[in-house]
């Protein structure tokens, strides 16, 4: 759920859909580890980099076994040395020295090896699943999660942290660290009596089972459906890469046959390129009706959906909240459901009027090109793609030729070096999990600081069908190790993507979406690598509020639409010619095409999520009420999309789906500071340094509302995003600032 950080997320920007599965027992033979394991991680080399050449499942499991035991024993040892909750009196309150020197710093030191081993396991799971299969990783993940939870679930530690002398002064970062522990404990029922704790545990156990059932049925529904196409004429408009992905025999991508499934990326692309309306409708209806009573009733998720809502509401009530959405706001920058609703309503004023004009223009274009009648939902993807192509006059495959991966990556590093005053240098001779993997040191830009790196990261960017856990071109930023002054640890990360590998001397060529993905993930990496916090618990992306965690990625993505950035990262892979101006204009035009329609859909899903977690109405009644407020196309009476809405029902985004738009608004406003400096011939590097010193440096050690004010000098406004999308109109009511409730005690999202 999007309100606690005990269950460390698998990786950035991918929901942990497996976290609540019911598993059978298993036996693992654990080899012994030496006594020095408490001071040195057995999986690291002498230079504190992972010894990937010698990391095996057995060694990971052995290290996790030792490190989790160390944490649990340390927590018990600490508890014995502290006053018990029932013994604590007003004159026995803890001092600043007691809290940090005697409790929180020792916990950080004993937890560090586990956090690193956990990160290494994630890297292997994503980068080479033959070395770390899913079942093995989930075994490690669950054991590590339970041990980490013990730090936040100690009544003795909670009592001491809570009963602090009000006269003791803490730094801003120390307040956030302490409050993280307090909020974690509170949301896990620490303040409940024993009877209520048993009720909460029972609710959470049943909730986990319902979420697992929801996920498993949605997964089966995706795998169950398939449609085979044998007619090559239907596939003529499909780009070669997509035809190959759909081909049953990859060597026969031109002749076919091709199999269409409901795997999200492939289904989405099929709707964009399929010229046959009947086939489009078949895929669309199968997708929107999956997991409902209209298809295979054994996979119907309607009951599980309602059970999940009920258990979440009971959980919130037991913890003292009116509903689950209000409880969720404890870990959000927005601060309240009311603030979020006002935010969504404000954006809708601009998006809906644009949606109306866009759909009219799209239908007119379709009619001019042979379509008869009114456009329906399953028609939009195909005709918008054709409409965009007609406006841009350039296809995606042509644009790819100007974005060879080596150029893009080199330009990206140069851009980061210029804006954020760092140096990025490749280091050879480092152990990796595959020959394609490279390692880079990050140095501070100061000449005197370039002898010792401040951070490091790996890149693993090419797809490997038998090794990586992905079907589409997706990517992850894995935080392997957080910065910590008390363990003398520098940040370590890995960027893992699934771009096409070089072939026959031709480099990997990226689509503009691929480039955007790489920039986005590197933005996350920068926040992890350039943090300046002292405590690991609030370093980088740790402890950041959920609705802000995507901001650093979106900021880097915005830089793509700057002509200087495009010049830096692009050139034709064979001729070295620069990207033609009309191509750059096409990229900008594509960004704004149907932006109102897309934004209305995101606003609808955000509001749907909140309504389902604040009201008790049946899910279908909620949908029927909200749909016409956001969507202009008619609602299909059999459309059952909530029954497969995995991000909020089996994923981690319950009552938090709005976070995607919230973070985009903040990121656009942040980028506008760079844009304004460029337009006014000011030093853009000064803006970059200010961004590094605030958003990148402070991580989760300061409330994001305060960080934004330090960077921008005011509260955030949606005007920048609306302008970037071509939706802002001066004659409409000016967009208001994104109001927030700044809570000093707000804790945030754990990566």
Image (cartoon, rainbow, N blue to C red):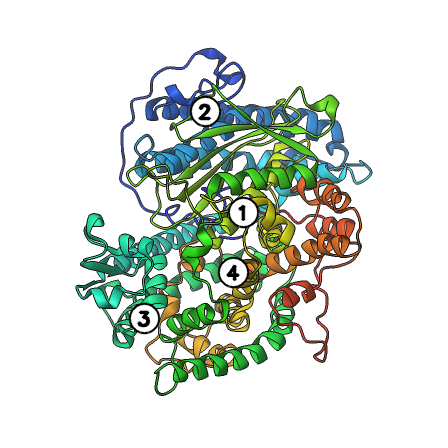
Q: Residue at x 38, y 47 (%)?
A: 20
- Label 1 vs 3, first from the N-terminus: 3
Choose between 688 and 141: the one closer to the eye: 688
| Residue 597 seen anywhere in this rendered image of the structure | yes
SS under mark 1: loop
In this figure, which residue is indicated by the disc labeled 2?
Answer: 69
- Label 2 vs 3, first from the N-terminus: 2
SS under mark 4: loop
Report crowding for label 1: few under 14, some 14 to 19, many 20 or more residues within 10 A (C-alpha).
Answer: many
In this figure, which residue is indicated by the disc labeled 1?
Answer: 570
SS under mark 2: helix
Report the side of 491 relative to 634 (left or right): right
Residue 183 percent across, percent down from the top left: 61, 46
Instruction: Please report contact status of discs 2 and 4: CB closer than 8 Å, yes or no.
Output: no
In this figure, which residue is indicated by the disc labeled 3?
Answer: 284
Q: Which residue is drawn at 82% across and 38% down?
A: 167
- Foreground mark, 2 or 1? 1
Residue 228 percent across, percent down from the top left: 19, 62
- Foreground mark, 2 or 4? 4
Instruction: Please report contact status of discs 4 and 1: CB closer than 8 Å, yes or no.
Output: no
Please, is residue 205 above or below residue 274 in the view?
above
Query: In which quarter of the view is residue 108 placed?
Result: top right
Report crowding for label 3: few under 14, some 14 to 19, many 20 or more residues within 10 A (C-alpha).
Answer: many
Q: Distance between the residues labelled 4 and 3?
A: 23 Å
Which disc is residue 657 wearing? 4
């Amino acid at each position: 759920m999007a309100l606690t950080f005990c269950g460390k997320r698998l990786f950035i920007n991918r929901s942990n859909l497996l976290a609540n599965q019911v598993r059978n027992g298993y036996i693992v033979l654990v080899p012994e580890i030496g006594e020095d394991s408490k001071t040195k991680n057995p999986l690291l080399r002498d230079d504190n980099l992972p010894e990937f050449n010698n990391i095996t499942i057995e060694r990971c499991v052995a290290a996790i076994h030792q490190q989790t035991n160390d944490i649990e024993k340390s927590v018990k040892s600490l508890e014995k040395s502290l006053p018990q909750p029932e013994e604590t009196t007003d004159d026995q309150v803890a001092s600043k020295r007691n809290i940090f020197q005697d409790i929180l710093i020792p916990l950080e030191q004993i937890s560090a090896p586990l956090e690193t081993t956990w990160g290494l396991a994630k890297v292997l799971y994503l980068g080479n699943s033959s070395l770390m299969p899913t079942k093995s990783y989930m075994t490690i993940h669950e054991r590590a999660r339970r041990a980490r939870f013990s730090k936040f679930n100690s009544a003795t530690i909670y009592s001491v942290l809570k009963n602090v002398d009000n006269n003791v002064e803490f730094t801003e970062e120390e307040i956030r660290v302490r409050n993280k522990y307090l909020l974690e404990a509170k949301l896990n029922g620490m303040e409940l009596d024993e009877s209520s704790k048993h009720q909460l545990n029972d609710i959470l156990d049943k909730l986990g089972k319902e979420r697992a059932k929801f996920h498993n049925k949605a997964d089966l529904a995706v795998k169950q459906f398939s449609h085979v196409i044998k007619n090559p004429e239907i596939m003529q408009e499909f780009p070669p890469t997509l035809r190959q992905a759909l081909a049953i025999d990859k060597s026969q991508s031109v002749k076919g046959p091709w199999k269409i499934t409901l795997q999200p990326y492939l289904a989405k692309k099929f709707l964009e390129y399929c010229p046959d309306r009947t086939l489009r409708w078949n895929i669309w209806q199968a997708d929107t009706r999956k997991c409902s009573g209209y298809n295979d009733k054994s996979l119907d998720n309607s009951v599980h959906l309602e059970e999940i809502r009920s258990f979440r509401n009971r959980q919130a009530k037991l913890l003292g909240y009116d509903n689950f959405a209000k409880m969720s706001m404890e870990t959000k920058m927005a601060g309240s459901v009311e603030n979020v609703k006002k935010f969504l309503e404000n954006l809708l004023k601009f998006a809906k009027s644009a949606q109306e004009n866009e759909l009219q223009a799209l239908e007119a274009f379709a009619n001019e090109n042979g379509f008869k009648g009114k456009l329906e939902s399953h028609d939009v993807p195909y005709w918008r793609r054709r409409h965009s192509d007609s406006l841009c006059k350039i296809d995606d495959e042509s644009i790819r030729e100007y974005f060879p991966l080596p150029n893009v990556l080199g330009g990206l590093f140069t851009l980061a070096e210029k804006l954020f005053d760092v140096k990025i240098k490749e280091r050879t001779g480092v152990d990796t999990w595959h020959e394609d993997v490279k390692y880079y040191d990050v140095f501070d830009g100061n000449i005197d600081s370039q002898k010792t790196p401040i951070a490091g990261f790996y890149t693993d960017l090419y797809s490997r069908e038998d090794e990586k856990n992905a079907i589409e071109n997706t990517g992850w930023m894995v935080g392997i190790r957080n910065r910590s002054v008390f363990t003398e640890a520098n940040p370590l990360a890995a960027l893992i993507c699934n771009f096409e590998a070089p072939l026959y001397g031709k480099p990997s060529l990226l689509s503009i979406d691929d480039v955007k993905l790489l920039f986005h993930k590197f933005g996350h990496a920068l926040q992890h690598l350039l943090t300046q916090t002292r405590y690991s618990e609030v370093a980088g992306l740790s402890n950041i509020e959920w609705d802000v965690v995507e901001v650093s990625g979106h900021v880097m993505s915005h830089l793509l639409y700057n002509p200087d950035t495009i010049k830096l990262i692009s050139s034709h892979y064979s001729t070295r010619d620069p990207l033609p101006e009309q191509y750059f204009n096409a990229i900008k035009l594509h960004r704004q095409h149907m932006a109102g329609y897309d934004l209305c859909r995101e606003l609808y899903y955000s509001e749907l999520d909140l309504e389902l977690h604040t009201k008790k109405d049946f899910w279908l009644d909620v949908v029927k009420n909200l749909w016409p407020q956001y969507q202009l196309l008619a609602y299909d009476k059999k459309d059952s999309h909530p029954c497969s809405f995995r991000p909020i029902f089996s994923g981690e985004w319950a009552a938090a789906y709005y976070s995607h738009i919230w973070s985009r608004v903040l990121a656009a406003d942040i980028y506008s500071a760079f844009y304004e400096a460029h337009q006014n011939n000011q030093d853009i590097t000064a803006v970059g340094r200010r961004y590094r010193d605030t958003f990148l440096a402070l991580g989760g050690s300061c409330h994001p509302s305060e960080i934004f004010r330090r960077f921008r000098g005011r509260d955030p406004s949606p005007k920048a995003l609306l302008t970037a999308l071509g939706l802002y109109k001066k004659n409409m009511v000016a967009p208001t600032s994104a109001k927030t409730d700044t809570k000093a005690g707000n804790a945030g999202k754990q990566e």
